[in-house]
Amino acid sequence: MNIQLVGTYMEPIADKKKAIFKSTMELVREHGFHGTPMSMVAKHAGVAAGTIYHYFESKDKLICELFNYAQQQVIAVVEQEDCATIPFKACFANLWMGLYTFYRNNQDILRFFEQFVNSPYSAAMPRLEEDKFYTLLFAFFERGIQEDQLREVSPRTLGMLTHSSILSIAKLTASGRLSLDSKELEQVHELLWSGMARHH
Amino acid sequence: MNIQLVGTYMEPIADKKKAIFKSTMELVREHGFHGTPMSMVAKHAGVAAGTIYHYFESKDKLICELFNYAQQQVIAVVEQEDCATIPFKACFANLWMGLYTFYRNNQDILRFFEQFVNSPYSAAMPRLEEDKFYTLLFAFFERGIQEDQLREVSPRTLGMLTHSSILSIAKLTASGRLSLDSKELEQVHELLWSGMARHH
DNA sequence: TCCTACCAATTGAATGTTCATTCGGGCCTG
DNA sequence: CAGGCCCGAATGAACATTCAATTGGTAGGA
């Protein structure tokens, strides 16, 4: 039986299934989609090759489900930080740092995402309007504009700019090619903020 | 004889070699690294499979050489826009639009790059210090700081932020999921500028 | 001018490997 | 003992790479 992930946030997932997800993520991070045969996933996850096919129709389905699984986690971060009870500016800072921290601590996911969205798999992704992550993100910036905190630039543009800055900095620091202390990280999102904010 | 590309900018490249580059780029864009067998490249380029191996040691080498080949073109854009004879702010605007336009007009390259840098191939990339593109980019922002035009944020950070904004907007508009008119494009890099600029 | 020796360029069928996927059977648990 | 889980060897397709054979062009000698 395929246990559904989608929608209900995160039902208990069969152990083996979770192990397969985890292994796939790690291996794909290190070796790419090509370069990670099912046999390798099986061995790494400690299951037999056939078992994977008990849980997933095919390699492609596995990859796509894994994407959704990981996406849920990112969505959880956004939902946690996007709260209307604190000033928008602070909320923006939290969101930036929250997402940044998440990607830094989950480099597998970061790398997997980037591979996924730039591969032909991305054809299987929902359109922006149906993508929960982006819907949340855009709504957040919409709110900033409503509250007269942000310039009148399309919320989509603001959302993409913010997210891309997080991703690029996270990738860079994760790769060890650049290291930023916490003061410099603050600088980054302040810089973004001062570009996007409405100057009264 | 392998005609060298590296270093001397761009020697005349054997026709077939160029055809192979072009086909690989288009096919990889559409089908990914996996998903484009050498036989497909051969057919698309109008050569025999064996011919590819006359010019390239292996598939991996082909991919890596292609990356360098494309990188040269991006470097050319930076070199063209980064001129010290006009005010820094204008130069920044030119650079942003120049790179954006380049990626918009060369979606193959954009997509190929993103796949490459997030794949295991990226291990073959030079370190940031030895990467000509980034060296130029960072020097550009260094200049802005010297000239007291920019905040004192690490030039690397500024460079990465700028480049990531270009890439994300170019990817998004290229995919048709968002379209920006020229006024909105201006807004984007002005927004960035106002975040990065020193406020006297 | 013609002939020939030489070599780079090119071909595509053949090779051997790697891989996704299948399936017949074993092992628990209720 | 039925039914769900799980195993892993076997299968067949797809692929990167090789190589023996062919072409075409060029330099030199007569």
Image (spheres, coloured by chain):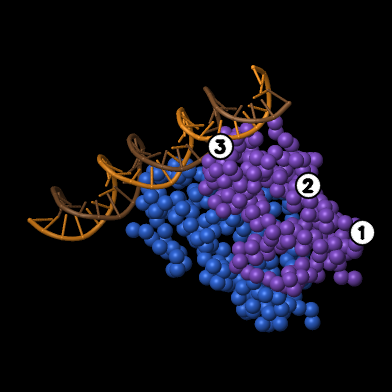
Chain colours: A purple, B blue, C brown, D orange
Residue A12 visible from this viewpoint: yes
Q: Are marks 2 and 3 on the same chain?
A: yes
Write the residue at 68% across / 82% down: B147
The residue beneath circle 1 is: A85
Q: Mark 3 or 1, which is nearer the eye? A: 3
Q: Mark 1 or 2, which is nearer the eye? A: 1
Above or below residue A111? Residue A97 is: below
Task: Decide which of tag 3 and tag 1 comes sooner along the chain.
Answer: 3
Quadrant of the image occupied by residue A53: top right
In this image, A183 relative to D25: left or right? right
In this image, C10 relative to A133: left or right? left
- Secondary-structure class at tag 3: helix
Label number found at residue A132:
2
Chain identifier of the residue bearing label 1 in the image: A
Chain identifier of the residue bearing label 2 in the image: A
Tell me the kind of residue under disc 2: Lys
Write the residue at 38% across / 50% down: B53
Give neighbour class at mark 1: few <14, some 14-19, many 20+ (Cα, 10 Å).
Answer: few
